[in-house]
Each structure stands twice: as structure tokens, then as C-alpha cells.
């Protein structure tokens, strides 16, 4: 529990500020598990979630097909449900799409938006993300917005600029009040599914710069309250060091979220 003991965000002790920042560990299951496998995994996570302190929020994002069954499996536990994406239209003739109202109706509290796999493989643009985010927030669904540079951008020293423009292009279309329902996930593309984690120092310097980008538009209080997650080969063996950084408020977990024990071990790493 060291994270809470020496909570020192912005050089203030938690006792002397009104910082509302939440710590979150979220599991992005991506396109993995069948429905029965997913229900079994969700049940195991819900059962073990009793070990996780009250001030760490647990979120799981199964595939769309699983949401109803997984909602039932985690009911009554502290595990919140997220989608991995949503449509950029409210309803109607958009074959194959899933609306925010549909997500709300199965009990989704969150949706992930702008994951690098969606940006890279499905042409998701910042403009589309603005539309999706508007619909999600209007429907009362919180957004986990993913940003992050690819390997080429990192090697060219553009990682700060890439993250800044991804934040500006999407979040700057919203209000400071909206930010209460937004979480940012920094996921360097070169660290996703590769086993290569950003070092705690590499992650922290980007997280701090992301927080500055939020502050430039929305002010210090909103920036200090913003939860910023790290994602990319985060696992039980490296979570503690990452989460100990002053601007890293939890993780968006891929591979390790598919094992209940690993996912919970990560949530116990603050
Ligand atoms: P891995 O943890 O498998 O690297 O995936 C991270 C991720 O993309 C979570 O959204």
C-alpha cells in the first residue's frame, strides 16, 4: 500500500489537498475467450476482487458478445464492466456496430476508446473518437481514452508530441466537467504484447507530460484529478515499480488480464 502511504501528487500530501484521483486497474481482454471461458474468468476475478483495497477500482473489458453474461457474473462484486469500443452513431442502419445505449443497457460503466489496435487496423481517427466520446459521455458511460506512440515515433524522439496531439485532438473538444468521466491510458505501441515494458522512468516522464497537456486546457485541479493508466506488457513483476511513480495511477492490462491471479496481483501492486 505504499502508493497511498506516500501519496505526494504535485508535492502535496493527500491530507492537504482535495485530489480526487482514482487508482484503476483495467483488463482489456481484446478478442480473446469464448463466452463460457469469459464468464469463468470474470467469476474468478470477481471472487478474488475481495482482496483488492476499496480505493483501487477494478474494470474488465470483455468482447461485446460477452457483456451481458459477464455483467451477471460480476454482479454484486466491485468489478466494473467496460466495452472495448463503441459506435460513432447513436442508432440506426449501421450494420455490425454497437451503440452506447446498447452498452448502457447491459450495465457497461466504461468504454475504452482509441486503442492503438483500433487506430492501426481499423482506421480510427481522432475525429471519429470525438464523435464516439460525445455519445459515450452523453449516455453516462465513462471513457478510457488510449494514446501512445509507435516505435518509429519513439525512435525519432516524437513521443511527447504524438501523445500531446492525440490528447489535444480529442479531449480539447470537451469541458473540464467532462474530464471527471475520462481516464487516459498511455500505451506505447512498441510495448503492447511484445513483452517490452516502458521503464518506470520512461512511462513517468510521458505521464507527467500528459498531465501537463490536460492542465494547459482544463487547469491544475482537473489535471491533478485525472487518472492516467499505463499499458503495455504490464504484469505482476513490473506493476509495483510502475505504479509507484507519482503520475501513474494504475494500468490497462492486456495479456495478464486473461489470468485472474495475475490481474489481481497487479491490482495489489499499489
Ligand atoms: P499487453 O498487456 O498484452 O501488452 O496489452 C496492453 C494493452 O494493449 C491493453 O489495452
Image: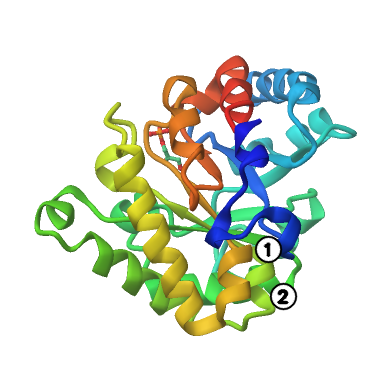
The way the protein has been coloured in the rendering is rainbow
Tell whether 174 sits left or right of 194.
right
Residue occupying the point 72% across, 17% down: 44
In the picture, the quarter occupied by the N terminus is top right
Q: Position of residue 202 (x, y in %)?
A: 29, 46
In this view of the protein, can residue 147 be seen by the observer?
no
**For the residues bearing labels 2 and 1, Cβ distance under 8 angstroms:** yes
Residue occupying the point 41% across, 60% down: 208
Task: Give the quadrant of residue 190.
Answer: top left
Which element type, helix, strand or loop, lies under badge 1? helix
Query: What is the total number of numbered labels drawn onto the structure image?
Result: 2
Asked if 159 appears above or below 230 in the picture, the reply is: below
Asked if 61 appears above or below 95 in the picture, the reply is: above
In the picture, the quarter occupied by the C terminus is top right
Q: CA distance from mark 2 to mark 1?
A: 9 Å
Residue occupying the point 43% across, 71% down: 212
Tell whether 154 sits left or right of 135.
left
Q: Earlier in the sequence, mark 2 or mark 1?
A: 1
Mark 1 close to ligand 1, CB under 8 Å: no
Instruction: Identify the mark at residue 100; answer none if there is no mark.
Output: 1
Q: Residues within 10 Å of mark 1 (few under 14, many from 20)?
A: many
Instruction: Identify the mark at residue 138; answer none if there is no mark.
Output: 2
Between 213 and 262, the residue placed more toward the observer is 213
Mark 2 or 1: in front is 2
Amino acid at each position: 500500500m505504499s502508493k497511498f502511504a506516500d501519496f505526494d501528487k504535485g508535492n502535496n500530501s493527500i491530507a492537504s489537498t482535495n485530489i480526487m484521483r482514482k487508482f484503476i486497474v483495467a483488463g482489456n481482454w481484446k478478442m480473446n475467450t469464448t463466452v463460457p471461458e469469459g464468464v469463468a474468468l470474470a467469476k474468478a476475478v470477481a471472487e478474488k476482487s475481495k482482496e483488492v483495497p476499496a480505493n483501487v477500482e477494478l474494470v474488465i473489458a470483455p468482447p461485446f458478445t460477452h457483456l451481458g453474461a459477464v455483467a451477471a457474473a460480476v454482479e454484486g462484486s466491485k468489478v466494473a464492466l467496460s466495452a472495448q469500443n463503441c459506435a460513432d452513431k447513436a442508432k440506426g442502419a449501421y450494420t455490425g456496430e454497437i451503440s452506447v445505449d446498447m452498452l448502457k443497457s447491459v450495465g457497461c460503466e466504461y468504454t475504452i476508446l482509441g486503442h492503438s489496435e483500433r487506430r492501426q487496423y481499423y482506421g480510427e481517427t481522432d475525429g471519429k473518437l470525438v464523435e464516439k466520446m460525445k455519445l459515450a459521455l452523453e449516455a453516462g458511460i465513462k471513457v478510457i481514452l488510449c494514446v501512445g506512440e509507435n516505435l518509429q515515433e519513439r525512435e525519432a524522439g516524437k513521443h511527447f508530441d504524438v501523445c500531446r496531439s492525440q490528447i489535444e485532438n480529442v479531449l480539447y473538444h470537451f469541458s473540464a466537467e467532462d474530464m471527471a468521466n475520462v481516464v487516459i491510458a498511455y500505451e506505447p505501441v512498441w510495448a503492447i504484447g511484445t513483452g517490452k515494458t516502458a521503464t518506470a522512468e520512461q512511462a513517468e516522464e510521458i505521464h507527467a507530460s500528459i498531465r501537463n497537456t490536460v492542465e494547459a486546457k482544463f487547469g491544475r485541479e482537473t489535471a491533478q484529478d485525472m487518472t492516467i493508466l499505463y499499458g503495455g506488457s504490464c504484469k505482476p513483476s513490473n506493476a509495483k515499480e510502475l505504479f509507484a511513480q507519482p503520475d501513474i495511477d494504475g494500468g490497462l492490462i492486456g495479456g495478464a488480464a486473461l489470468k485472474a491471479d495475475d490481474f489481481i496481483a497487479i491490482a495489489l501492486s499499489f
